[in-house]
Image (spheres, helix red, strand yellow):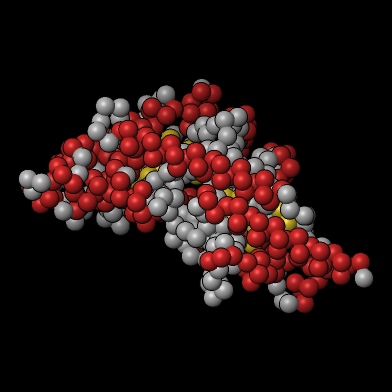
């Protein structure tokens, strides 16, 4: 539920409180930000990129009146790495100096060195995901394990490249965790149909489910990939968006190296990150990266060839990535403002996650796991039989029917769970936690009023 919709999501959700309802707004917009325009103007990355885009400003004697000294220094640094300016092609893998900044970030995060030669900068994480799926899929008999509910990028890209989607269901009752008994059965069934399962996708923190995988779950996952000879694609784009302390984000790469040989030497892992999430929310800038671990050198060479087809990732997005992974440090002029703003945004999102979860769980026939991370809430809506029958008469999937009724009654736009996949006979909706914090009481009150009325209508009708 957000008037500025969630980032990087096909069919994201939008909402307005009843006082600002627009009935004509029937479709969700894929645009988003996690900050207000004023936040964006003060954050370091737009300042640095603005100077890089207009380097003549650096020669203006008054530049120091408009830009802090550390932003000016960073702009000069990136211009020295891109002597042709932002309008010139870079290395097809991205500017080497920025890839080094990414490698240093990964080493600080995980405690293990990272090789810049195995890091590719991309136009958002989505392009990196598509590039790797294209490299893995040879024909329709190549299968990719994808979590369900899933972010639709995966099913769409697998279909585009002619592969086979092999869905594995997350366990809602276990806070959307992984059940390897069921996953092993899924792999066995796929193989019995002649499908070669080649890779497995995880989204951690989850989209649309909002869970954070535990370290034990990730260990079991890596052991599974090792024994089944699967490459692991780790979508970790929401790693900064954590709203509880009990289950912090831990990268698949760190767990892999902590486990030691033979897994740390043999499991093929590709990890993805982006500037679109966290407290940055720079989804329109299209900055991302992927890092390859344990991929054979010949495979890396082929991936380089494919990356070269597109000549280079966009250079402003690369600079945004550099600023994200190497933000202002203590002692820098911008540090105190940066630290205060980023802390304020994440703390507000933590409060919003709790308000939304509690709000949904206060509603009749609604059950919602806490949003531990990412930007989404994915409540289960227990629809009465008569509501399901009414949906069928209207020619609608039941959760689509519910979401349309919600939109018509309140102006709150959400995405039906069927758009992400769900177990048969179970219904959800997905929404974001991105509305302004002060709007939450009105939004959740409006939702509760609608839901209680909807349930009363169809449960009462059922009793007639």
Residue 170 image point, x, y percent: 67, 45
445 or 43, nearer to the observer: 445
Residue 56 makes an appearance in the image: yes
Answer with left or right where residue 277 lies relative to residue 232: left
Residue 8 image point, x, y percent: 46, 55
Q: Residue at x 16, y 53 (%)?
A: 54
147 or 380, nearer to the observer: 380
Residue 229 image point, x, y percent: 57, 38
Q: Is residue 44 above or below residue 20?
A: above
Q: Quadrant for the C terminus, please.
A: bottom right
Q: Residue at x 56, y 57 (%)?
A: 1
Q: Residue at x 21, y 40 (%)?
A: 68
Answer with left or right where residue 115 lies relative to residue 360: left
Q: Residue at x 63, y 55 (%)?
A: 444
Q: Is residue 259 above or below residue 296?
A: above
330 or 305, nearer to the observer: 330
Residue 147 makes an appearance in the image: no
């Amino acid at each position: 539920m957000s008037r500025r919709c969630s980032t990087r999501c096909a069919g994201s959700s939008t909402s307005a409180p009843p006082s600002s309802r627009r009935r004509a707004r029937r479709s969700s917009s894929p645009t988003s930000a996690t900050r207000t325009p004023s936040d964006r103007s003060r954050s370091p990355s737009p300042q640095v990129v603005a100077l890089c885009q207009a380097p003549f400003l650096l020669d203006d004697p008054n530049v120091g009146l408009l830009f802090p000294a550390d932003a000016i220094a960073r702009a000069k640094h990136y211009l020295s790495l891109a002597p042709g300016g932002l309008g010139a092609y870079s290395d097809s893998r991205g500017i080497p100096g920025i890839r080094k900044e990414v490698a240093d970030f990964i080493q600080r995060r995980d405690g293990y060195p990272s090789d810049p030669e195995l890091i590719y900068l991309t136009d958002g994480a989505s392009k990196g995901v598509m590039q790797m799926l294209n490299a893995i899929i040879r024909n329709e008999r190549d299968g990719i394990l994808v979590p369900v509910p899933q972010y639709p990028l995966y099913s769409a890209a697998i279909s585009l490249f002619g592969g086979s989607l092999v869905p594995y269901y997350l366990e809602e009752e276990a806070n959307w965790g992984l059940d390897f008994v069921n996953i092993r059965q899924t792999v066995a069934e796929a193989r019995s149909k002649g499908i070669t399962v080649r890779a497995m996708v995880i989204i951690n923190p989850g989209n649309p489910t909002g869970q954070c995988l535990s370290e034990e779950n990730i260990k079991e996952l890596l052991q599974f990939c090792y024994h089944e000879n699967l490459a692991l694609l780790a979508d970790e784009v929401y790693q900064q968006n954590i709203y509880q302390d009990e289950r912090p984000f831990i990268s698949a790469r760190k767990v892999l190296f902590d486990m030691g040989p033979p897994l740390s030497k043999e499991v093929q892992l590709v990890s993805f990150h982006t500037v679109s999430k966290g407290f940055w929310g720079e989804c329109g800038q299209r900055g991302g990266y992927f890092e390859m671990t344990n991929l054979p050198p010949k495979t890396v060479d082929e991936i380089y060839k494919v990356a070269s087809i597109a000549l280079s990732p966009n250079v402003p997005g690369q600079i945004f990535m550099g600023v994200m992974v190497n933000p202002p440090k203590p002692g820098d002029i911008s540090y105190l403002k940066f630290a205060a703003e980023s802390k304020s945004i994440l703390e507000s999102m933590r409060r919003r996650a709790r308000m939304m979860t509690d709000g949904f769980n206060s509603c009749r026939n609604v059950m919602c796991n806490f949003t531990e991370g990412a930007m989404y809430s994915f409540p289960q809506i227990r629809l009465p039989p008569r509501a399901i029958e009414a949906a069928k008469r209207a020619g609608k999937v039941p959760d689509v029917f519910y979401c349309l009724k919600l939109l018509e009654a309140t102006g709150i736009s959400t995405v039906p769970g069927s758009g992400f996949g769900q177990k048969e006979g179970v219904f959800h909706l997905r929404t974001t936690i991105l509305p302004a914090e002060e709007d939450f009481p009105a939004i959740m009150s409006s939702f509760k009023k609608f839901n209680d009325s909807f349930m009363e209508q169809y449960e009462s009708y059922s009793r007639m």
